[in-house]
Image (cartoon, rainbow, N blue to C red):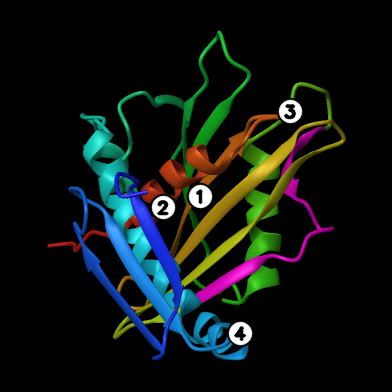
Amino acid sequence: FQTHRNVILFEKTSTANVGHQLNMYSQRQYYAEVTYTNTSELLELIHQYADVLTHQIQKKEQARLQKRIALAKELDGIYQKHGTYLPIPKRFSMVLDTTNFSWLEYSPKKNEIIEGVFIYTLPFETIFSTFPLLKARDSVLQLYVPGELEGSYMATEAQYSPWVRYEEGDSNVVLEIKSQWKMQNAFMGGPFVSKFLLDSASQSITVVEAFLFNPGKNKRDHMQQLQLIVDGAKKQISN
């Protein structure tokens, strides 16, 4: 196991402890060791440290992926228009670019896969909570993301409860939502992650979103890469 990228070792000993370090047995490896004296103690340690260990592994995986991604150039116009920078891989190409909505996509002809990124703005008056934002999202996507069938368009799949993360700063608030999308009145769907950036200074709500269509395949690696794009979204400071 010493050559694995990430290692968590559980060992029954005379003491209880959780420790971790980098590059234990190989370069860029995250290694954690959990020692426990009995089963109930092990369960308590897992409950207490699961989020910390998961976060550390995700950080390492993100750093590894970032080094492998070649970023697209000549997108300054998109960044300036939306006041937001994104680390867009160069494999993506523009599908639609309007005053309020930009859509980039990677969709190779030989594979049934679509990786998409949206950047758009919402009215600052939009209620900044999960379901009003998702409702506003669906209104925007109905306008700009039609399906192949007449009357079809991308929308949020209401049958799934969204995962939500809320973060507040000095002049901005971030709401991240993960859920499933569907093509209304058609047969397509998949996971998506949206990041809503409320900036009080500029009186704006910017949305950065990534979605995946990859039917019947494992979506983990693709969503990790799309998550990097969303996580890398940064509001630009106007001069």
Circles 1 and 2 in contact, beta carbons < 8 Å: yes
Position of 224 with respect to 39 (left or right) is left
* Region of the chain picked out in magenta, as a range: 152-166
Visible residue check, residue 204: no
Q: Residues within 10 Å of mark 1 (few under 14, many from 20)?
A: many
Q: Quadrant of residue 77?
A: top left
* Amino acid type, residue under disc 1 in the picture: Glu
Q: Secondary structure at mark 3?
A: loop
Kind of residue indicated by mark 4: Thr
Q: Are marks 3 and 4 in contact (CB under 8 Å)?
A: no
In the picture, the disc for residue 230 is 2
Which residue is at a point 30% across and 44% down the rendered structure image?
3
Q: Nearer the viewer, residue 6 or 97?
A: 6
Give the structural element (helix, strand or loop) at label 1: strand
Quarter of the picture holding the C terminus: bottom left
Horizontal and vertical percent position of residue 48: 49, 87
Q: Earlier in the sequence, mark 3 or mark 4?
A: 4
- Magenta highlight on residue 24: no
Disc 3: CA contacts within 10 A as few (<14), some (14-19) or many (>=20):
some
Query: Does residue 116 appear in the picture of this structure?
Result: yes
Nearer the camera: disc 1 or disc 3:
1
Q: Outermost residue toward the top? A: 110
Q: Going by the image, does 191 lie left or right of 57? A: right
Q: Secondary structure at mark 2?
A: helix
**Which residue does the numbered mark 1 point to in the structure image?**
209
Q: CA distance from mark 1 to mark 3?
A: 18 Å
Which label sits in the foreground, 2 or 3?
Answer: 2
Q: Nearer the viewer, mark 4 or mark 1?
A: 4
Label 3, label 4: how many angstroms apart (C-alpha)?
52 Å
100 to the left or right of 6: right
Disc 3: which residue: 147
